Image (cartoon, rainbow, N blue to C red):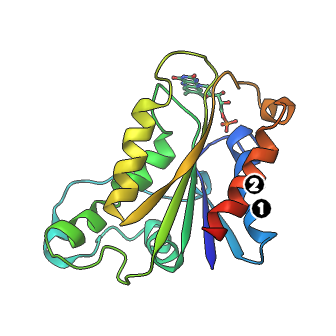
Amino acid sequence: MKVLGIAGSPRRGGNTDLLLAEVLKGAASRGDKVKTIILSNLKIAPCQHCDGCLETGRCKVEDDMQMVYAELKEADRIVLASPIQFMGVTAQAKAMIDRCQVLWARKNVLEIPPLGNQRERKGLFISVGGRRVANLFEPALATVKSWFRTLDVTYAGDLLFPGVDEKGAIAKHPNALHEAFLAGQKLVEE
Ligand SMILES: Cc1cc2nc3c(=O)[nH]c(=O)nc-3n(C[C@H](O)[C@H](O)[C@H](O)COP(=O)(O)O)c2cc1C
């Protein structure tokens, strides 16, 4: 099984990076192949709503998103990690998600499988936020669930930690990293 981790934080070695690494360690401990894409290292332009994909089923913007499409297609499990920024996912994660409009077009307009093959995929969402406010994760969850649904990826759950702000603070949480490791194991066992 192939597990694709997508790091959506612009802060390298930050809280969601640490959680994502543990999830992937958990998956790898079960013998599965893991790979991480770091969105902040990539050039991914925002969707320009040119509507070209509605006719061709392909995004005409030739940037690093073409590689991400190929990785999504190859993956059996997809783990998106993004901290909360202004109540949503990061700009890096949102640009990647919006560029999946082509997959929406494939599925809903052209009526072809969004990722081109019919394998059973599952997705996990990892997030942290610095504050502790009601509904902190709700807007991001709505975006991420809509993205997974569009890709025909079954939502397998999430790891959500409020009140985690400083870089690396998640390592001081009593059980977050262990929970992440177990979630990675569970994701590939299901
Ligand atoms: C631009 C920006 C916006 C943020 N907005 C929020 C927010 O709306 N709510 C919140 O709880 N934390 C917010 N934070 C704090 C981050 O979610 C927090 O620092 C988190 O631990 C960062 O995770 P990372 O280390 O994986 O990047 C924001 C941080 C930045 C840089």
Picture quadrant of residue 139: top left
The residue shown at (15%, 69%) is: 54
Q: Is residue 152 above or below residue 11?
A: below
Q: Earlier in the sequence, mark 1 or mark 2?
A: 1
| Amino acid type at mark 1 | Gly
**What is the C-alpha distance between the residues marked 1 and 2?**
6 Å
Image quadrant of ligand 1 equals top right
Mark 1 neighbour class, 10 Å CA radius: few under 14, some 14 to 19, many 20 or more: many
| Amino acid type at mark 2 | Leu
Relative depth, front residue between 8 and 122: 122
Locate residue 72 relative to residue 56 in the image: left or right: right
Give the SS element for disc 2.
helix
**Label 2, on which residue?**
182
Locate residue 17 relative to residue 117 in the image: left or right: right
Q: In the image, residue 100 lies at what x, y percent? A: 34, 61
Locate residue 48 relative to residue 18 in the image: left or right: left
Picture quadrant of residue 77: bottom right
The residue mark sitting in front, 1 or 2, is 2
Relative depth, front residue between 15 and 9: 15
Query: How many numbered discs?
Result: 2
**Label 1, on which residue?**
26
* Dot 1 and dot 2 residues touching (CB under 8 Å): yes
Image quadrant for the C terminus? Answer: bottom right
Q: In the image, residue 90 lies at what x, y percent? A: 51, 39
Q: In the image, residue 106 lies at what x, y percent? A: 23, 72
